[in-house]
Structure formats: structure tokens, C-alpha cells
Image: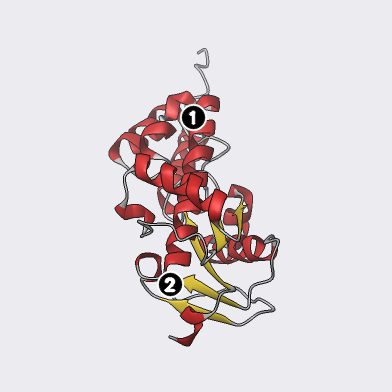
Amino acid sequence: MLWLDETRFCGVDEAGRGPLAGPVFAAAVILDPGHPIAGLRDSKRLSEKRRDALAREIRQYAAAWAIAESSVAEIDALNILQATLLAMKRAVESLPLVPAHVLIDGNRAPMLSVPVKTIVGGDDTVPAISAASILAKTARDAALYALHSQYPQYAFDRHKGYPTRLHMEKLRQHGVSPVHRRSYAPVRALVEETAAKGAYAPRGRTGR
């Protein structure tokens, strides 16, 4: 691919499309050929400790980087795909350098003012996209740890909002929080179930 020879191409990736809670994040990274970073790959293939270490290197040595997000309200209003593309657009437009080209993991891309190419599996094959994957993932994990401090009853520090058995148990036990995505089927079903129970709950005894 000719674009891989360019020094001003930007890698973009997201984190957090699947979870039931919290924002979706995206990152954009322009690597510096003069400061190569060893070990870049898809963030999902790295341990949390290794991701955190690489994130520090990327922030220090990349030519430019930016992280952006779309809120839970935006996810529910737009749908997760459009909210993800919005976060990607925000990340690219927040870069302190204007990239010559943008390479995005996956097969969908936002409308940008610079040339864009999507690459399926790019997060594990294109270093700049791998770097973006790492920044997006570590930023989102940090956000979920912060949400855990606000809502410790949901154990966000353990499942990061993904629909694990533990998360579903906590949802059924404590109900839907303000940071849950109500447009997602499991959360929507619980909201509807709770509303139905409230509508048909006994309203007290009447005397005879």
C-alpha cells in the first residue's frame, strides 16, 4: 500500500462499541518515523499492563495524537455506528497536525476533509492504527474506572460495561443507571420490564 510510505498518515480506531454502558471512544495517531515504538498491535491482544505502557510511549513519541468520545446520550440518539463515526471525526479534527491521509480500522469511515481508507483488521497490521487502538482502549478503560467510583454497585472496574454475566446480574439487582445505553436491547428490555411491573403493581388494599 503506497500510503504506508507517507510520513503524515494517521491511524484511527475506536473502543467501546459493544458495552452496555459508558461512552464510545476513538483515537487518532500520527506516528513519528524518527521514534519507532516496538510492540504495537491490536489492543485486545495485549495485557492491560502492556497497553498502559505502550499508551505512555505513544503519547510521548507520536508526532501527534488525539482522543475523543461520543456520550451515552449521543449513542442513544444517533445509534452506535453513527456515534462511533462522530467520535472518530472528532479525534481526527482534534489533531494538532493535519494528516495527509487517514487510515481507519474496519469498513466504515466518517466524512473527513482529507483522503480516507478503511482497512479491515488494520488494528493488528498497521502500526498507526494499532497505536490508535491502544489509546482508545486505555482511555475508555480509565473512564470506566472513573464510572466505577461513581457507581460501585455495578462493578464497572471488572467488566468495563460489557454484557458479562456479572454485569447483567448487577443490572437486574440495581436497575439501569444514568450511564447505561438505553438503546441497547438488554438495557431496553430491563427498562421496559421495570416499567411494566410499575404499571401493574398492586396499589394497596381497599377496604370492604
Residue 50 x %, y %? 36, 44
Which three-letter amino acid code belongs to the residue tagged 2?
A: Gly
Residue 18 x %, y %? 41, 54
Q: Quadrant of the N terminus?
A: bottom left
Mark 2 residue element:
loop
Residue drawn 49% across the image and 42% down it: 191
User: Mark 1 and mark 2: span between their CA atoms?
Assistant: 30 Å
Few, some or many residues within 10 Å of mark 1 (<14, 14–19, 20+): some
Mark 1 residue element:
helix
Q: Are marks 1 and 2 in contact (CB under 8 Å)?
A: no
Residue annotated with mark 1: 148
Residue drawn 30% across the image and 54% down it: 45
Which three-letter amino acid code belongs to the residue tagged 1?
A: His
Residue drawn 52% across the image and 48% down it: 182
- Image height check: is 23 above or below 199? below
Q: Is residue 113 visible?
A: yes
Few, some or many residues within 10 Å of mark 2 (<14, 14–19, 20+): some
Residue annotated with mark 2: 106
Residue at the bottom extreme?
2
Residue 42 x %, y %? 36, 59
Residue at the top extreme?
207
Q: Is residue 170 left or right of 59 when viewed as pictured? A: left
